[in-house]
Image (cartoon, rainbow, N blue to C red):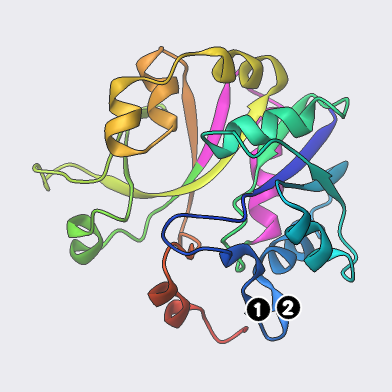
Amino acid sequence: MIALGVIPARLHSTRFPKKILYKINSKPMVVHVYENAQKSNKLNDLVIAIDSEETKQALQDWNVKTIMTSKDHICGTDRVYEASKAYNADIIINIQADEPGLDYNLLNSLVSEFENNNIDIVTAAGRNMSNEKLKDKNIVKVLLDKNGYALDFYRNISDITKKFYHHMGIYAYAKNSLEKFVKLQSTLREKELKLEQLRAIDNAMKIKVHLVDIATIGIDIPEDLKNLNSQF
């Protein structure tokens, strides 16, 4: 199996404009992500899918591979799909550009899930779900079936007696499953909750969830920067 990692890097994010270029220890955030992903021994190739000349110029002095994609994509997966068409890959991993603490071992684990399973999509979630996180609408929760597949994803929950996990925004797709996903129409729930994975759930595509002890911290808004750990 040939595995490709794609980091969709939209410049003008709504809640934190140009966050992919925000410098952490003098290095753009997306470069931290790229360098961590590059350590994976399961990825055959890795690229940052950009959408602006500004990003291209900002990254030219760093040892990263980029590919220009359309500015018109409504979600990161569409950008990943466009970039993936330039490669011959069996598995494509959508790696979030705003998770500078990415653990490359997670990428290895996601690719390995395809070695023994006939699955469409694999994502990741952390076991570290606290009561505080359960109440935070910015933290996406996932509920699993007995076989480790996602039953549904939530921002707000009412039944706290069920076992929820902290969903991480990383996805690995079989090539044909990625193509199927991007050709589906956005669903009402996807639009309402701004969770693109609901498009898959609402169209009966199965999402396997790989559990880790601690969910990686994503940088959605400037205030999230204070949560970066000591490695930065």
Boundaries of the magenta span: 103-123
* Other-residue count near label 2 (Cα within 10 Å), few / some / many at <14 / 14–19 / ≥20: few
Q: Which residue does the image show at 44% across and 55% down from the upper left?
A: 14
Please state which amino acid type lies under the numbered disc 1.
Lys
Residue 20 at what x, y percent from top left? Answer: 62, 63
Instruction: Give the residue number, with chain letter if any, for mark 2.
Output: 27
Q: Amino acid at mark 2?
A: Lys
Q: Quadrant of residue 144?
A: top left
Residue 111, placed above or below residue 104: above
Dots 1 and 2: beta carbons under 8 Å?
Answer: yes
Q: Nearer the viewer, residue 15 or 181?
A: 15
What SS does tag 2 mark?
Answer: strand
In the image shown, does 95 or 3 lie closer to the viewer?
95
| Residue at the spot 72% in from the left edge and 85% down from the top edge | 26
Which residue is disc 1 drawn over? 23
Residue drawn where x is 50% and y is 78% of the image: 228
Question: Camera-side residue: 202 or 216?
Answer: 202
Residue 70 visible here: yes
Could you tell me which secondary element the residue under label 1 belongs to?
Answer: strand
